[in-house]
Image (cartoon, rainbow, N blue to C red):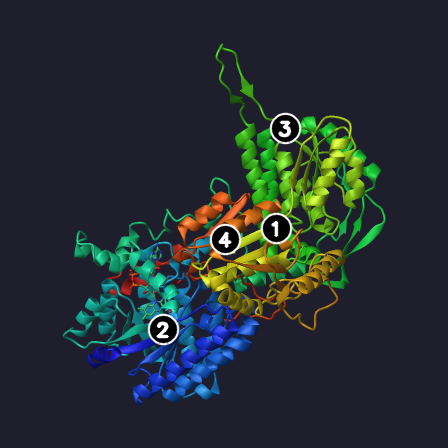
Amino acid sequence: RARPWEKRGYRYSYDMLGEAAYTDADAIGYFQTYLDAIRVVGLASKGQGCIRSAGVSVKLSALYPRYEFAKAAHVHQVLYPRLLQLAQAAAQANIGLCVDAEEVDRLEISLDIIEQLAFEPSLKDWQGLGLAVQAYQRRSRAVVDWLVDLAERSGHRLMIRLVKGAYWDTEIKRAQEAGLATFPVFTRKLHTDIAYLACARSLIDAGMSIYPCFASHNAQTVAWILAYADQQQHREFEFQRLHGMGEPLYVQVSERGEWRPATRIYAPVGGHEHLLAYLVRRLLENGANSSFVNRMVDDALPIGELVRDPIEQASHHDYAPHPDIVQPLDVFWPRINSKGLDLTDPLVLQAVQHRLQVIKPNRLAQPIIGGKALAGQRVALLHPADTTQQVGEVIEATAEQALQALRLAVAAQPSWEALGVERRAMILEKAADLFEQQRIMLMQLCVEEAGKTWKDAVAEIREAVDFLRYYAREARRLFDLPLRLPAPTGEDNQMVLRGRGAWLCISPWNFPLAIFVGQIAAALAAGNTVLAKPAEQTPLVAAAAVRLLHEAGVRGDELHLLTGDGARLGKAIMAAPNLAGVVFTGSTEVAKLINQQLAARDGAIVPLIAETGGLNCMIVDSSALPEQVTRDVLASAFQSAGQRCSALRVLYLQDEIYDRQMAMIQGALAELKVGLPTHLDTDLSAVIDQEAQQGLLAHIETFRAQHKLIDQLALPTDLPAGHWVTPTILEVSGIEALNQESFGPILHVARYSVEKIDQVVDAINQKGYGLTLAVHSRIEMRWRRIARRARVGNIYINRNQIGAIVGSQPFGGQGLSGTGPKAGGPHYLLRFATEHCISADLTAAGGDTRLMGLSDT
Ligand code: FAD
């Protein structure tokens, strides 16, 4: 198919479809496809050289399932040798090999790889090494400068493909979801266009160090480049377009009277099953209102408008960010979103590392009653993943101290309530700010005391902060003004909400900060005082949180910390007649026990708010996308070592897809890393304590004897003595096989035939848990039917919308212990340079000299 175009002077770059491999087997398959392609293209090129002959484009995410910043060390060990082999094959065939640009958080790692390749002795004489640069990234100009420098240092004339970027929607949504300071990409299309021109100018100005390849379908962009290149008398470059796109534009370029540059066509090659991700990007690109190709087919748009100078247009809004694209911290406005921490950004990691060296968390958890930390006998707290390490000490409260706390809390409640909702809400919001200021310290405690990975620890702090702000707002909404009720005879009927008194808040260890603080914040916001009883395993995090709440303005008598054994303390407090209520998160058995204790005591009947576990299921039918299913299954079943009440316990797979889906899930399981939570490349760590470990191991033993073991990850041999449970997949007939939650990294899988889907849902209902249910289906009738029939509190339906797969990628984070790419290299550029820094010198004469580009970066 390429031949007719080649006869007209076009060149090709072949893109072997397939990206974001989920298993190593897939990655090896893609690698082989690339290798074959290089061989075939090399044979066909007949020694014309890297520029004149066809080339191959490669996506690094296809070569290794964990092409992530967090896995930098493994990327260098596994992915790099594969890429080197491809580059050596391309060098031998004397053709070009271009590394495509993918998501923003993969840029640093791709630059590291390119730098390493550029200095490979075996590639010394090859001039076909290429990289795509995305102009929509705010740091694109700086990346171009770095590449020009690399070309000069290494003696390679790099083939740099300048694109605008194909993952814009994903980057925007991801930044919002992650609560980043701002976006890593521009928010106005015009700014991307201007950055593209600025980068193009730098590439042309680099002279013979670089062979620029300008990939665009925008006539204004193309015309500008031609004009600038003519002015500079620079002819060593080419244009590139996608197969099936920009044909009329490049026909005009090729019919240009004067000298005309060559055009290369980027052509996807492969079967339909691998086409989807590529196709989705093209649909998004062509479907966007702002896209040039979309605007071009609008007959109502005058041509002058279509090709207007982007600098002149951008000057009208002074290069300011787009006002309608909500900044990440404003997505819940008027509530401020909690700040995220981008663990894929080397500069952020440096700052975290620096902070970790400076802070000294308080490692003694004491009962805090009436604002005073009480003395007593100290008990050691051990690291769950390394029991040889003591992370701190705890002093347990006595039953008398607990009752003393209750008396103080009851006495203090009227004055706390009398403060008024506005003041209480402000105190909680101040606490949220303090939590954010102290987040590294809080994260460190979560990692060491609860065995949270760094990624989970970030989410933990964010959730706690969100709770504080959320309850502050809700309290204002509900408690501020009385609700006026109908008054048919002229009377004044008002409904006023108020606090009930002193509450006991009992929280679990699996969210030692978020749930602990959520319970307290809700109670305090409503005008109650609180006795906070954290889990025995995580008193350090709880004590840190209580200190910050006190610092924010909650007085000692209004919030007490009762460290120690739940059964002992709970029994004493719950017998007291002046307790106003209990909030509890934990196991169903303990919730039932508390319910009985409260029912048995004298005094008023008080509320019990209990959030207990779940036997959560996921139903997947044959229309689901295997990659999305795999990603969700791994995250839900194994993230946090399965220690979440919402974690996936039973996966139901339709018969027809069972084998294929399981092969992918098992392949992805093999890529998980179990290790110390302090290492950022760890995916999951140990479970919380020995009791949990033994229960889980016993469950696995029983089930492998009675049912079937499908897979189990081999634990690394160098793990320290800790509460390790290896991620395990067991086959069962259905949810009937399970009688209780196994709170750890154990996934049960069951087959079902599609005509029995109702029975599956009924079986789930009959278990009586109904916490969460997930459904993966593209068949609307089916997921609606399941959603209607299921008796669960929270249904997650993944309709496998095509947009969702663009850039879908598991979590990241680089080893704080220095296992990732070296920090401080020249390319570690400010990811979030201000959008304002596209400056244009409008006073200078002549279009091409007006571009200053992103000089501030
Ligand atoms: P235009 O319509 O002029 O520009 C579209 C660009 O504007 C897109 O980048 C879009 O994201 C951006 N945009 C839209 N709205 C906004 C906004 N509000 N704020 C900021 N920016 C906005 N892309 C990759 O990511 N990696 C690659 O490796 C890659 N390789 C390619 C290879 C070739 C040969 C070609 C032709 C394209 C390649 N692309 C790649 C895709 C490329 O990014 C898109 O084709 C390109 O964005 C379209 O640009 P344009 O100049 O043709 O269109």
- Tell me how far mark 4 sits from mark 2, CA to CA: 36 Å
Q: Residue furthest right?
A: 377
Q: Are marks 4 and 2 in contact (CB under 8 Å)?
A: no
The residue drawn where x is 55% and y is 47% is 762
Residue 576 image position (x, y, % from top left): 78, 31
Residue position for label 2: 270
The amino acid marked with disc number 1 is Leu
- Tell me how far mark 3 sits from mark 1, CA to CA: 42 Å
The amino acid marked with disc number 4 is Lys
Residue position for label 4: 756
The mark that comes first in sequence, 1 or 4, is 1
Q: Residues within 10 Å of mark 3 (few under 14, many from 20)?
A: few
On the rendered image, what quadrant is the C terminus found in? bottom left
With respect to residue 149, does 174 lie above or below? Answer: above
- Tell me how far mark 2 sits from mark 3, CA to CA: 68 Å
Out of 89 and 856, give the one closest to the viewer: 89
Q: Residue furthest front?
A: 755
SS type, badge 4: helix
Return the mark for residue 419: 3
Task: Tell me the mark number nearer the camera, choosing from 3 and 1.
Answer: 1
Q: Residue furthest left?
A: 257
Residue position for label 1: 615
Task: Tell me the mark number nearer the camera, choosing from 1 and 2.
Answer: 1
Return the mark for residue 634: none
- Tell me how far mark 1 sits from mark 2, CA to CA: 41 Å
On the rendered image, what quadrant is the N terminus found in? bottom left
Q: Are marks 3 and 1 in contact (CB under 8 Å)?
A: no
Residue 155 image position (x, y, % from top left): 41, 83
The amino acid marked with disc number 3 is Leu
The residue drawn where x is 50% and y is 73% is 64
